[in-house]
Image (spheres, grey):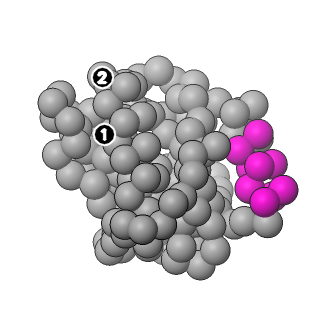
Amino acid sequence: MKLPRAIFDAIVRQARDAFPDECCGLLGGRGEEVSECLPVRNAERSPTRFRMEAQDQFRALQALDRAGLEITGIYHSHPRSRCWPSSRDLDGAFAPGTNTPLYPGAVYVIVALDGQGPSEVRGFRLRERQVFEEPLEVVDGHRGSQA
């Protein structure tokens, strides 16, 4: 996944601002190219879980649709936790009782924070409840935007 520096910085800033709670949002673009970052409020307001606030999520999905973009990624933070999808993350990523991802093809980006700032940022793909690391390439020279 190619992540413009401006979008990478916006995700990290949102994670820092939400600390000690988790933050979340959607990434939009085409293929491996990310061009939009759409922050979504965490309805849980929790340091150990996230659930996208329904109205925010709906608005973000509408914005992507209007722009003709697809969901390229889902991001959230792990305050004081390792940079790997938790069992809760996996449960929330699949349709209940199935091995079907809610957002097929999306990269799941996790920002791990240690209290001072990001300690690690990694991407993952999910297939049949298995986790595969996906390289993230932060690219300069791409404007990117934050909705």
Q: Residue at x 81, y 48 (%)?
A: 62
Give the SS element for disc 2.
loop
Q: Residue at x 37, y 47 (%)?
A: 9
32 and 43: which is toward the camera: 32
The amino acid type found where label 1 is placed reads His
Q: Which span of residues is magenta-colored?
A: 59-67
109 inside magenta stretch: no
The quadrant of the image that shows the C terminus is top right
Relative horizontal placement of residue 19, taking residue 28 as reference (left or right): left
Q: Residue furthest front?
A: 141
Give the SS element for disc 1.
strand
Locate residue 28, reporting x and y percent: 62, 60
The amino acid type found where label 2 is placed reads Pro
Relative horizontal placement of residue 115, taking residue 60 as reference (left or right): left
70 and 124: which is toward the camera: 70
Relative horizontal placement of residue 127, taking residue 54 as reference (left or right): left
60 inside magenta stretch: yes
Which residue, given by chain and number where applicable, does mark 1 sit on? Answer: 78
129 and 75: which is toward the camera: 75
> Disc 1 to disc 2, how far (Cα)?
9 Å
Secondary structure of the magenta portion, mostly?
A: helix
Q: Residue at x 74, y 56 (%)?
A: 64
Circle 2 residues within 10 Å: few <14, some 14–19, many ≥20: some
Locate residue 87, reporting x and y percent: 38, 49
Which residue, given by chain and number where applicable, does mark 2 sit on? Answer: 20
Circle 1 residues within 10 Å: few <14, some 14–19, many ≥20: many
The quadrant of the image that shows the N terminus is bottom left
